[in-house]
Amino acid sequence: MKVVLSPNPYRDRGLKAAMTARSILEKSGVQAVICLPFELDENSHLELPAEAELRPIESELESADVLVCFGGDGTILHAAREATPRNIPVLGVNLGSIGFMAELEQGELSLLSKLAGGRFGVERRMMLDVRVRREGRQVFSETALNDAVITKGAVARVLDLEVTGDRVTISSFSGDGVVIATPTGSTAYSMAAGGPIVEPTAENIIVSPICAHSLHAKPFVLNADRAVGVRMSAAGGKKSAYLSVDGGRAFRIQPGDWVECRRSRQETKLVKLTGRSFYERINQKLGKV
């Protein structure tokens, strides 16, 4: 068995957690290699230990059985982009503040030994294909594990948005934007915008307006097979909006552009080791217990 350990070096200082995990896995008879999830900026001034023996993640993932990432939810989302197309399950170790998607906390690294005997489960999470069409041609395409968020610019006035399901209007409103989320993403920006918390293994699409200027603009939970569309009114003149998929780099949306979110054929696989339920995790992370 081969496990790729991918630490966010800004969260895992000195790669201490990753190196501890490597030691635990190797003692259990597992091949473990450490790969950074991204190239470091030349001005980062991070000191990485030579004994970490860092390897390129793209080549190591080709023969990996599990990808373990160390950081917050953003690190897991980044890891999913690499692992999902290769059908590799992802295990998250939380080094951030909340970490809804992480299976382990830093003090639970000893549980990684379960990977050696195959004593773990795999939970499948639905994803969304997000595309933007402009004047009949596709100008943007990404796949989301969490959400696709359309928001106004920093100094823009409110947006006039139409949200559709299978090209039938669901809601039209003015506001700061809208979140189109998977159940996994229901505990992220969608929840902050007033959307419902949905079990992550459910199969739905959650539509949550952001600061809508209407009493009638409410969150919707749709069937996973709906094609959810969002269009900014062409009457918006020079207004612009921005689309961000899983918190990634923003793409500028123009009036008249058609943003469409559909259930993806891809699914992210998350490794389950602890047996903690979703409800236990929610109560712990949100400080209810």
Image (cartoon, rainbow, N blue to C red):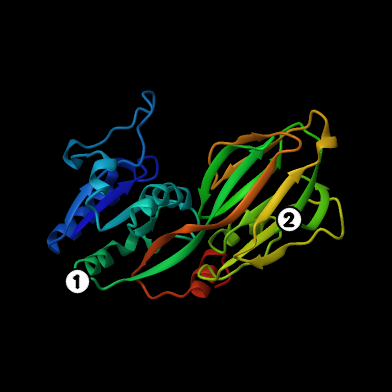
Give the residue type at disc 1: Gly
Read off the residue under disc 1.
Answer: 117
Q: Residue at x 70, y 57 (%)?
A: 208
Q: Is residue 114 left or right of residue 103?
A: left
Q: Position of residue 51 (x, y in %)?
A: 16, 40
Q: Residue at x 85, y 50 (%)?
A: 213
Please tell me which residue is depicted at 53% across the width and 62% down the height of the picture.
184
In the shown orientation, is residue 203 left or right of residue 241?
Answer: left
- The residue positioned 24% from the left and 42% from the top of the image is 59
Residue 261 visible in the displayed image: yes
Find the distance from the CA under tag 2 to the CA under tag 1: 49 Å
Viewport quadrant of the N terminus: bottom left
**Residue 17, horizontal then vertical, whole percent:** 29, 51
Q: Is residue 102 visible?
A: no
Direction from residue 179 to residue 34 in the image, left or right = left
Which of labels 2 and 1 is toward the front?
Answer: 2
How packed mark 2 is, by other alpha carbons closer than 10 Å (few <14, some 14-19, many 20 or more), is: few
Of the pair 280 and 289, the residue shown nearer to us = 280
Element at label 1:
loop
261 left or right of 57 in image = right
Q: Quadrant of residue 137?
A: top right
Residue 37's quadrant in the figure? top left
Q: Which residue is mark 2?
A: 167
Q: Earlier in the sequence, mark 2 or mark 1?
A: 1
Residue 142's place in the image compared with 226, above or below, is: above
